[in-house]
Image (cartoon, rainbow, N blue to C red):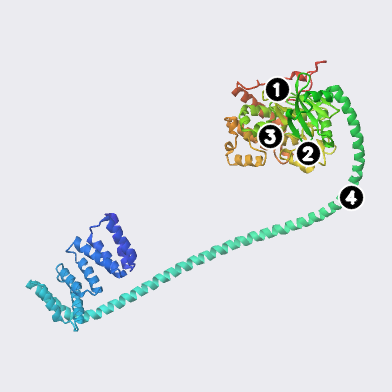
Amino acid sequence: MLLLTVYTRAGNEFFKQKKYQEAAMHYTEAMKNNPKDPRVFSSRAQCHIHLGALSEGLDDADKCIALDPTFLQGYLGKAKVQFLMSNYENALATYLEGLKCDPNNLKVLDGLRRCAACIKRANGGDATAEDLREILGNFHSNDDLHNKLQKSMDEASVFKNEASDERLKRIESERMARTLEDMYLSQVEQRKETEESLLRVQQEFEQLKIQKEEVTKELQKANEHNENLQGQLLASREHHDWLLSEHDHLLHERDNAVREVEELRQKRGQMLSVLVTAMHCEFSLSELESATRNFSSSLKIGEGGFGCVYRGILRNMTVAVKVLRPGSLQGQSQFEQEVSILSRVRHPHLVTLLGTCSESSTLVYEFLPNGSLEDFLVCSDKRQTLTWQVRIRIIAEICSALIFLHRNKPHPVVHGDLKPANILLDVNLVSKLSDFGISHLLIQSSTNNTTLYRTMHPMGTPLYMDPEFLSTGELTPQSDVYSFGIVVLRLLTGRPPVGIRKIVEDAMEEGDLNSLIDIAAGEWPDVQVEQLAYVALRCTELSRRCRPDLSDEVWNIVAAMRDAATLSSPSSSRPAQDENCVPSYFICPISQVRTCETCL
C-alpha cells in the first residue's frame, strides 16, 4: 500500500509538471501494486489523452468504469476521448451516464453543451439552450431532477459570458505563471552552471599556481645542475688530457710487463712441473687412453669451452678425466692454474685432484656419480630428491669451502666461477666445489691494503659474476660471495638465475615470498626461508662493500640452519659432521701437527 501511495503521488507531481510520459510510467507501477484502484486508471487515461494516445486512454477509461461504475472521472475521461475522436453521439451518451453519478457537475453539463453544439453544427445549424433542455428532458424521467437541471442550465446561461471572460483571464494568468516559472527555473539552472564553472576556473587557477611554483623550483634546480655539469665537463676534459698522457705511459709499461710475464710463465711452467711431481701422481697418456677406451664418446660425461670430461677406470678406481682441447692457449693457462690451486689445498668439499698428465694437459679427479647441482635443479624428477634439508646442508658445505679458500695461507684463493654447474654431488648428495680453471691466488694491494686480483679480461659466467668484477676487473673474495648468493636463491626457489634477485626482493617487499619457494623441496620452515632470502639478498648487493663476510656473519646463520635441518630429518642421507672439530685430513700424517682450522 505504501508503494501505491508513493508511485501515485510521484505520478501526480509529474502530471502537474506536464511530464505526461513519466507520470504514465509511475501510474503503471502503482497499478502493479493495486490493479483494482479506478483512480489510477483514470489518471493514466488523462496522461494518454495529453500524449495523443487516444485508444490507450479509452481503454483505461473503460477499465476505470468497469471497476467503479459510480466514479465520475471515468465517464469524464471516456467522453473526452470520444469527443476528441469526433464521436459526438457516443460522447453525449457517456456524459449522460456520468450525469447519473453527479447531476450538478458543471464539467458534465459543459460537456453535454459542447457535444450538442457539435452535433447541431454537423447537421447544419447552431445549438441553443432549448436543444440542451430537450436532450436533458428526454434523458430524465424524474421531474425533480429535471427541474434541478433546468435551473442549472438557466444559471449556466446567465453566468456563461462572465465565466468565459474569467476563464480567459485565468488561462492567460496560468500561461504567464508557467512562463515566469520556466524563466525562473532557467535562471536558477544558469546560475548553478555559472557557479560550477567559476569553481572549476578557481580550481584550475590554483593548480596552475602550484604547477608554476613547481616548474620554478625545477628550473632553479636545472640551472644549478647545469652549472654543476659545466664544472664537471671542464674537469672531465682536464681528466681526459691526463688519461691520454697516462695511456701512453701505460702502453710503455705494458710492453715491459709482457716481457716480464713471458719470463714468469716460463718459470711457472718449470715450478709447476716440479710441483706436480711432488704432490700428485703423474699418469702416462697410454694409461689414460686405456682407462677411457681411447677417450670413447660413450664415456664422455661433460664438455666445456676448453675440453671434455670422461669417466674411466684407472688403477682399479673410477675417475673423471678432464682433457684439454688441443691448441687452446687459454685452456693451457686454465690447466696450469687448476693444478696450481688444487695442489695447494685440501678440503672435504673441494674436488680431489688425483693426478695429471703433462703430456696431454690432462687432469684426473675423483669421480662423483651424481653429476652437478645444475643437473638436479633443471630436472624436475631429480629436483624432488633435493629436500629442503639437503639444500640447506649443501649451502653450508659450499660456504665452508669458500671460507677455507678465502683464508688460505699465505695467499687467499678466489674461485671466480661459482655456479651450480661447478658444484658436484657424490652418491650421498654431498657437495664438492670443482673447476678451478679461472681461480686465482690473491695478492695484497699496495694502495688500499686489500687482497685482490686485477685483470683486463674478466672471465666467468655472466649471470653469476660480481658486477664490480665485470666493471673494474678486480677479483676479490666478495666476488665469490655474490655468486654464492645467486646459488642460494636458486636452491631456495628452483628458478633460473635470470633476474632472480629482483624477483625475490619484490616478493619480500610485498610479503609474498612463499609463492616463489620451490615446492619440490618439501614444506620449508617459514623462519629459515626468510633467513636464507635475507642472507642471499645481502650477498648479492651490487656494491661489494655492502656484502657480508662469510666467516663473520653468514656462517653462523647457515650452520645453525644446517643443524636444525639435520635434527628435523633423522633419515638424512649423511649424518651431521661437527664442523668445529678438525677433520683428520687437516692433520699432517708425519708430524701430526694440526693445520689452521679454516672451515669456520
Instruction: Give the CA distance from mark 1 to mark 2.
Output: 32 Å
Q: Earlier in the sequence, mark 3 or mark 2?
A: 2
In the structure shown, which secondary structural element does the residue marked by tag 2 occupy? Answer: loop
Give the vertical position of 374 relative to 19 (above or below): above
| Residue type for callout 3 | Val
Nearer-the-camera pick, 1 or 86: 86
Disc assigned to residue 579: 1
Give the vertical position of 464 relative to 113 (above or below): above
What residue is at 65 percent from the left and 21 percent from the top? 574
| Residue type for callout 1 | Glu
Q: Which residue is mark 2?
A: 459
Q: Which residue is mark 4?
A: 245
Q: Nearer the viewer, mark 2 or mark 4?
A: 2
Local packing at callout 3 (Cα closer than 10 Å; few below 14, some 14-19, many 20+) is many
In the structure shown, which secondary structural element does the residue marked by tag 1 occupy? Answer: loop
Where is residue 536 drawn, in percent x and y? Answer: 67, 35
Disc assigned to residue 487: 3
What residue is at 76 percent from the left and 38 percent from the top? 460
In the picture, residue 65 is in which quadrant? bottom left
Q: Nearer the viewer, mark 3 or mark 2?
A: 2
Disc assigned to residue 142: none
Instruction: Give the CA distance from mark 3 to mark 2.
Output: 18 Å
